[in-house]
Amino acid sequence: MKKRYKILTLGILLTVIIVSAVAAYVYSEYVPRVLVDDSLTLKENHQWQFDLYVLGNRNVNITVRTVQYLVFVTFWYQQNQAATTYLFDKQVTNTTQGGFNVSVQQGGTYYLSVQKTEQYGENVTTLVHVEVIS
């Protein structure tokens, strides 16, 4: 009887430890956090890559400010080599601050690209801030 009680106690203890570890991992991946906070000078374009852990829905806020010239902001999800899902493709000028809230439904690798227009030969100073807000 004592041996059976020890085995049951050990099984319960291991289950609690495993469930706690999984819950801690999910919490650490799911808390709101800043993914990108850059101030850069674009010569042509710049691309960021980040992984998102998603259960249900996540909201991503992307803010882009450009100092002088028009830039294009593209945010997409790459499922495999053949399937690309574009979540948005917008242009931002020096008179607008592009603040985009995007709802993300699946976990995986996401990409953000900021590209200047070809008509300007100068470098373009751009501020980029990407944050998972929920």
Image (tube, rainbow, N blue to C red):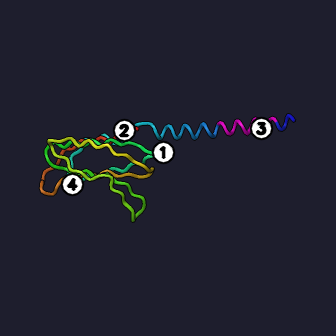
> Where residue 107 sits in the image (x, y, percent)?
45, 50
> As drawn, is 111 to the left or to the right of 39?
right
> Where residue 44 sits in the image (x, y, percent)?
21, 54
Give the residue furthest to the right: 1
* Sequence-earlier tag: 2 or 3: 3
Residue annotated with mark 2: 34
Q: Quadrant of residue 20?
A: top right
> As drawn, is 59 to the left or to the right of 121?
right
Viewer-nearest of discs 4 and 2? 2
Residue annotated with mark 3: 8
Mark 1: amino acid? Leu
Q: Which residues are magenta?
A: 5-16
Mark 3: amino acid? Leu
Residue drawn at the location 44% of the way across and 52% of the way down:
108
Tell me the distance, in whole angstroms, between the alpha carbons under discs 4 and 2.
Answer: 24 Å
Residue drawn at the location 17% of the way across and 42% of the way down:
96
Mark 4: amino acid? Glu
Residue drawn at the location 13% of the way across and 44% of the way down:
68
Image quadrant for the N terminus?
A: top right
* Sequence-earlier tag: 4 or 2: 2
Looking at the rendered structure, the secondary structure element under dot 1 is loop
Mark 2: amino acid? Val
Looking at the rendered structure, the secondary structure element under dot 2 is strand
Q: Are marks 1 and 2 in contact (CB under 8 Å)?
A: no
> As drawn, is 77 to the left or to the right of 121?
right
Viewer-nearest of discs 1 and 3? 1
Tell me the distance, in whole angstroms, between the alpha carbons under discs 4 and 1.
Answer: 35 Å
* Sequence-earlier tag: 4 or 1: 4
